[in-house]
Image: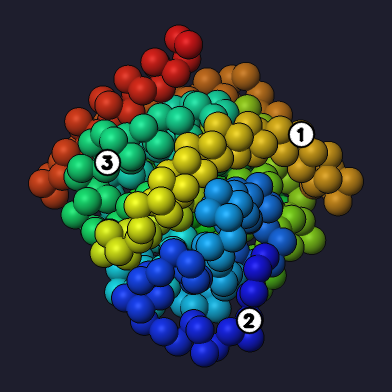
Amino acid sequence: MRRILGLSVALSLPVTMALTSAQALELKVADSFPAGHYLVRLMLKPWMDDVTKRTNGAVTFSYYPNQQMGKATDLLRLTQSGVVDIGYIAPSYASDKMPLSEVAQLPESFSTSCQGTIAYWKSAREGLLAQKEYAPNKIKLLMAVVLPPYQVFTVKNKIESISDIQGLKLRTTGGAQDLTLRALGAVPVRMSAPDAYESLARGTMDGVLFPADSIPSYGLDKLVKHATDGVSFGSFIVAYSISQAAWNKLPADVKAAMDEASEAIEPKVCADVDKEQAQTRKQLNDAGVAYDPIPDATKAQMKDRLKGVSAEWAAAIDARGKPASEALKEFESLLAASANK
């Protein structure tokens, strides 16, 4: 990472001043990930390095991880206001402002990161989500990855039947994930990823709905002992955006460099995330986490209960005056188009 700290004078300049010259353009990037998080390694850092290379060193970045600039739930506001130039804006952490994006987080929708990522990217850059979600929030998506299907990780409970998951207090990101767990009889506990360790350690939760690759990143491999295998419990969108106001002030060649870097990173990062799954699974097994295949009968029961989640989600968001059914139809169409290629 370039120039993480120690640049207080340069960083104190307002965005309007910082964006006046492509010869000395330094942008502040902020997220909630711990240092060394795999998505920073696979997506954010390569994208920043590529932009710097494409601009012949004219554009550089100051990176603030681990909620140094603000909580994950505050990064939409901090990006819109220009406190940071590029922020990690996860739709789940801004569900009141970005409810439609959760279409990519519904259960049993896709089986790989690339399937979900390519569909979401097309909708959020040029489709319905771009028009109805990003534009109204005055932000522009720069890069995103939809994670492989989430699994349930528990401290004590091995899940082999529907009754094994019922009543368990499990961490979620809210929204669609809450609906997913309620459909199975579990109790969703909404919180951001950095807060999960303390709740598990204290015993106030039984487990987490989480992506496998993030378990070691947050140290949860020291606490959880069991993981489900064979059912998609939904997903999560990791997205970095810039405010439209900041984007409009960028020189044309910088915009072009960023767009080119973004288009290049999308297919690569999802493929890398999919590959990382096998390595992470071995790492977790070595740490004492057992992947317990869900028996076929239980799997069929779970899938049957999860069938109605998408329609329930869409109906609830439609009732708020948002075109969720339209977003669901578009997303399913994009998934199908990707599968047919």
On screen, 44 above or below 5? above
Q: Bin the neighbour count of mark 3 within 10 Å (Cα to Cα): few under 14, some 14-19, many 20 and up.
A: many
Amino acid type, mark 1: Ala
The quadrant in which residue 248 appears is: bottom left
Residue 326: give its label.
none
Q: Of the two numbered discs 1 and 2 on the same chain, state the one appearing first in sequence.
A: 2
Distance Cα–Cα, label 1 vs label 2? 35 Å
What colouring style does the render use? rainbow
Q: Position of residue 56 (x, y in %)?
A: 58, 55
Q: Bin the neighbour count of mark 1 within 10 Å (Cα to Cα): few under 14, some 14-19, many 20 and up.
A: few
Q: Of the residues tagged 3 and 2, which is closer to the observer?
A: 2
Residue sitting nearer the eye, 158 or 40: 40
Tell me the residue that label 3 is attached to.
Answer: 129
Q: Secondary structure at mark 2?
A: loop
Residue sitting nearer the eye, 317 or 157: 317
- Quarter of the image for the N terminus: give it: bottom right
Q: Position of residue 197 (x, y in %)?
A: 65, 67
Q: Is residue 103 toward the left or the right of residue 254 in the image?
A: left
On screen, 292 above or below 26? above
Tell me the residue that label 2 is attached to.
Answer: 5
Q: Is residue 80 toward the left or the right of residue 268 in the image?
A: left
